[in-house]
Image (cartoon, grey):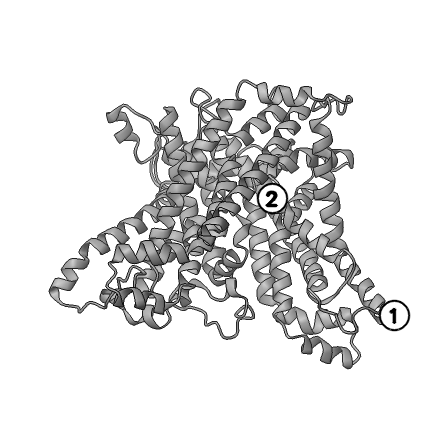
Amino acid sequence: MSTVARGAGRVTPARRRSALTGWLFALPTALFVLLLFVLPLALVLQMSASDWPLLAGNQGWNLPENYEDAVSNRFFLDSVWFTLKYTVLTTVILLALSLGLAMLVQESTRWKGFLRTAFLVPSALGLASASLLFYVLYSPIAGPFADLMASWGITFLGTPDGALWSTIFLIVWRYAGFYMLLMLVGLQGIPDDVYEAARIDGASRWQTFRSVTIPLLRPTLALTTVLCVTGSLLAFEQFYILTKGGPDNSTITIVQLIYSVAFQGQNDLGVAGALSVIVLLALVVINIAQIRAFNRKAED
Amino acid sequence: MSTTAPRRSRDPFADAPPTDSTVAVVAPQHRGRARGAGGRRGGAGGRTRPTTFAGIALRTPYWVLTAGLALIFLYPLIWTAISSVSPLAGTNQVDGWGLGNYVTLANYQAGIWVYLFNSLFVSLLTVALTLGISLLGGYAFARFRFPGKDLLFLSTLAILMVPYATLLIPLYVLLNAVGLSNSLVGVALVLTMFQLPFSMFMMRISFESIPREMDEAAMVDGCTAWSVLWRVLVPAVKPGLITVGLFAFLAAWNDFMAPLILITDSNRMTLPLAISNLRGQVQGVVDYGATEAGVVVLALPCILLFLILQRHYVRGFMSGAFKG
């Protein structure tokens, strides 16, 4: 931090000039952060406490009704439950698979280089593009599994469970390479002599994995878990494009609920704001809890 | 990643721990010893196998497994590319191979060119703004001491912790209030803001990895802070700028939620939005072929950029890992 720290304590004219120059260079950043981040954040707090229809604008305070309406929305509990279920499933599957992939492609050989690229290519696609791609792939008319689905009498997106697992597959396909990359960085950080010591002690592969790799990978696992949980809790595009919340409103995530309350029908920015604030607070609490859990384990 | 892997030597990020290598450099001493057929080590530090018949036979499951995995990851992309030009049920193109799906796509509503232009405009403006702001800001954070510096940097990083939707709804109201409703400029401003945490972090560590002697020497020669930045530092942080620009482009090109909320005029829609809408527009019947063509148009630039700039892409992921 202390980059211009010579002659600490005295405010010299040179120092003041340097501070001024620093501020000038930081000014665009400050403007963006203030106008496009801090101000909207304050506004969403105000919205959540106000009667605020989409088209009519602010109609005065409406507290605590907005929060009561948000919590008693008929899809609120269902969407919270579905979002949590989706988050747990996605995080477990994605992290386990990406760790496996990382261990599979660790060394640099030609074939493994190719594998890494193959696993990573999907992560270059946008989430919306990937969702559209799988929308066609899962289609009972045009998809490559159309005949199969017809003969089995099922569709990928036709049942609540089918829609959930189909979406999880899409997300795993899109993100596995990205998390594999993070795992590779973590694996690289484990010194070779630790493995050497485990080998000399006669540890089996599984023992080495459990007692050496996993504990030493903890910082990486913490980072990837926080990322994956946050991303999954805020899932939107994949469900908006692939399932539209269906079938039978079984795949509505909390962010989809916010979007539909704000812009689809109800057009109530006050209640949408209240939901947003609830999600924001929940996210902060969940992330702090995760970081604490990982730190506590590290102290054991 | 690729076999023509970059070496770490000239990489200015070589000193920053989380960024110190691209994946290709995963193989120092012990992991690198095993090559080709003898190469499965599973990270557990096993022993190198001799390439005997028994050794190869033992490894067959490994080849089957990895080839199968590669196929699963590549198949959806390959299938989409091929079937976008092949005859397909549920599309305008039922007989013969050709570009029929792309013609349908090109003639959709305002025409694909309008949406392509909108997407390019938003993406390039986002890239330009992100580069400019994070270059100046990163310089300020790395080289100057000014009141409120830490607060400003932490506030920038805090953008990551706030859900996208939480900010987009008030931003919709704010942009409307200042006359930027339905504006591509407004979308670019918002997307730039969302890029700032990653970009600012990236540019700050880029500047901090350059020895201070470089700018001090230039200062002694009578350069101002401004000319030091342009003449001395910008060339040195170029890899950081490429990474920041690449990520800004991909994020803006692919973004769906910001234009979905901020744009209602169909002539101002960006490509992902237009293609998503295209599905339901033809009398409620989904044109799967045109959707496929759209996915190809959306994905192709991203995949090409990824393959060309793979090294920057990988490094960006690693250092900006918290970006999600």
Whether residue B40 is visible, yes or no, is yes
Same chain? Circles 1 and 2: no
Mark 1 closeness class: few <14, some 14–19, many ≥20 residues within 10 Å: few
Q: Is residue B302 above or below residue A58?
A: below
What chain does badge 1 belong to? A
Q: SS for tag 1?
A: helix
Q: Is residue B90 above or below residue A3?
A: above
Tag shown at residue A13:
1
Residue at point 65%, 37% (across, down): B167
The residue labelled by disc 2 is B161
In x, y percent, where is residue B191? 63, 45
* Mark 1: amino acid: Pro
Task: Indicate left or right for A161 with B11 as reference.
Answer: left
What chain does badge 2 belong to? B
In x, y percent, where is residue B82? 36, 44
Q: SS for tag 2?
A: helix
Q: Residue A106 sits in which quadrant?
A: bottom left
Number of numbered discs: 2
Query: Of all residues shown, which one is farthest toward the right?
Result: A13
Task: Indicate left or right for B50 with A255 as reference.
Answer: left
Q: Quadrant of the N terminus of chain B?
A: bottom left
Whether residue B98 is visible, yes or no, is no
